[in-house]
Image: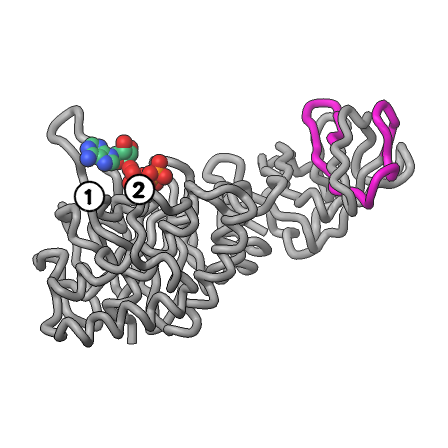
């Protein structure tokens, strides 16, 4: 059973010529207990989608169901959801405990003693027992976000909605909290929809990710499925760091060619039109450095970024620059002529016009 279901959701802001379609015909569902991450670049409609689910925005068209019940017309507090925001949204005049208790007061008829017990057990779960009597201004960003999480968890909702909850935290705290939220969600088994523009966050946290661009859903799948089998060029470039290399090629006979580049058509792509224009995608980590004048192309190493165990090398070919992930420092050096090659099973091919994956 889908715990959360969005059917042909559309959201338009404004009217007439100035209107913006923030979400177009979006259908998506999350199974019971699933951690679904909505990811995409800034302005693609992620927050609007989440706000429509929460009832903070009205929908222009479409239906939202929670536990099989249509909730599209319901007020936010009648939807059995709890939301966590990027800016924490804590009440400044209330202590951490009062912030957590507030929602319970509004939506349940628990006694004061029962509410206090819930606050304490939730605080224990989040390791914020010591902070309960403090007000938000004396808490760090990470502590505030824990209190905000506590306020969501304490209500035991059918669905958690999280809008970039880690964006205001520094890198190391972000990575710790990432693991904690994931662990918490797994323990609580609450269906979660999590919004981020950060593809690493999406890849590492999600059961499935839904990739959006310009208000439209591009692909839904398990993180590695989106990584290894992107359905189009947008998903291929958005998922993965450093980004997938893209080369404009033309099929000539049994070769894919470009200026100074030639690669045999992979067997599975044999039916692609001869003379057709394609985009060849290859991940930096799938490329091997070989002797110059062997492999698919030869170029000059322009920049090397050492990262410790690996380095990123930028190799200038005739018409483009290719990023290559190499072993540790010293594998290649600046100014060196190198050949590049890669196995056919790692090659992605996209139609040059539509961007749709064709092999
Ligand atoms: P970000 O990560 O930057 O928040 P997002 O993917 O969450 O981006 P949305 O905030 O949902 O994107 O915005 C989607 C589109 O809708 C954008 O073009 C935005 O300018 C527009 N938009 C959002 N809210 C409003 C509003 N209240 N009025 C008018 N346009 C809006």
Q: Which residues are magenta?
A: 314-338
Residue drawn at the location 43% of the way across and 64% of the way down: 127
Is residue 164 something one can see in this rendering?
A: yes
Residue drawn at the location 33% of the way across and 54% of the way down: 162
**Which residue is situated farthest in the right direction here?**
291
Query: SS of the residue at dot 1?
Result: strand
Give the CA distance from mark 1 to mark 2: 9 Å
Query: SS of the residue at dot 2?
Result: loop
Mark 1 CB lies closer than 8 A to ligand 1: yes
Between 71 and 277, the one lying in front of the other is 71
Colouring convention used in this rendered image of the protein: one colour
Q: Position of residue 260 (x, y in %)?
A: 77, 27
Mark 1–mark 2 contact, CB under 8 Å?
yes
The mark nearer the N terminus, 1 or 2, is: 1
332 drawn magenta? yes
Give left or right: position of 338 versus 214.
Answer: right
Residue drawn at the location 23% of the way across and 55% of the way down: 99
Is residue 214 something one can see in this rendering?
A: no
The residue that label 1 is drawn on is 11
Task: Name the quadrant containing residue 243.
Answer: top right
Q: Residues within 10 Å of mark 1 (few under 14, many from 20)?
A: many
Residue drawn at the location 29% of the way across and 48% of the way down: 135
User: Quick check: 48 above or below 31?
Assistant: above
Task: Name the quadrant containing residue 108.
Answer: bottom left
Q: Position of residue 258 (x, y in %)?
A: 70, 30
Between 309 and 118, the one lying in front of the other is 118
The residue that label 2 is drawn on is 45
Q: Position of residue 342 (x, y in %)?
A: 77, 47
Q: Position of residue 106 (x, y in %)?
A: 11, 62
Q: Residues within 10 Å of mark 2 (few under 14, many from 20)?
A: many
Mark 2 CB lies closer than 8 A to ligand 1: yes
Give left or right: position of 23 versus 302.
Answer: left
């Amino acid at each position: 059973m889908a715990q959360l279901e969005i059917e042909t959701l559309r959201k338009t802001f404004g009217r007439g010529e100035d209107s913006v379609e923030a979400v177009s015909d979006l259908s998506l569902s999350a199974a019971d207990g699933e951690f679904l991450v909505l990811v995409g670049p800034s302005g693609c409609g992620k927050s609007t989608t989440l706000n429509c689910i929460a009832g903070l925005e009205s929908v222009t068209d479409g239906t939202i169901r929670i536990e099989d019940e249509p909730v599209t017309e319901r007020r936010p507090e009648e939807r059995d959801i709890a939301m966590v925001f990027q800016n924490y949204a804590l009440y400044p005049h209330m202590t951490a405990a009062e912030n957590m208790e507030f929602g319970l007061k509004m939506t349940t008829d628990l006694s004061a003693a029962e509410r206090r017990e819930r606050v304490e057990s939730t605080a224990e779960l989040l390791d914020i027992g010591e902070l309960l009597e403090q007000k938000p201004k004396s808490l760090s960003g990470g502590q505030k976000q824990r209190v905000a999480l506590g306020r969501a968890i304490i209500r035991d909702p059918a669905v958690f909605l999280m809008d970039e909850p880690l964006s205001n935290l520094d890198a190391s705290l972000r990575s710790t909290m990432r693991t904690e939220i994931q662990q918490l969600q797994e323990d609580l088994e609450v269906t979660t929809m999590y919004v981020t523009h950060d593809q690493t966050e999406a890849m590492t946290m999600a059961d499935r990710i839904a990739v959006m661009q310009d208000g439209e859903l591009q692909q839904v799948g398990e993180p590695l499925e989106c990584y290894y089998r992107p359905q189009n060029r947008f998903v291929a470039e958005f998922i993965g760091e450093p980004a997938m290399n893209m080369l404009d090629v033309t099929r000539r006979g049994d070769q894919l060619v470009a200026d100074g580049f030639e690669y045999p058509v992979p067997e599975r792509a044999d039916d692609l039109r001869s003379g057709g224009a394609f985009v060849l995608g290859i991940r930096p980590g799938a490329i091997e450095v070989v002797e110059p004048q062997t492999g698919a192309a030869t170029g000059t190493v322009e920049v090397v970024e050492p990262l410790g165990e690996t380095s990123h090398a930028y190799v200038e070919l005739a018409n483009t620059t290719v990023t290559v992930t190499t072993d540790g420092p010293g594998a290649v050096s600046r100014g060196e002529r190198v050949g590049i090659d890669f196995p056919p099973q790692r090659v992605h091919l996209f139609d040059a016009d539509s961007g749709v994956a064709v092999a």
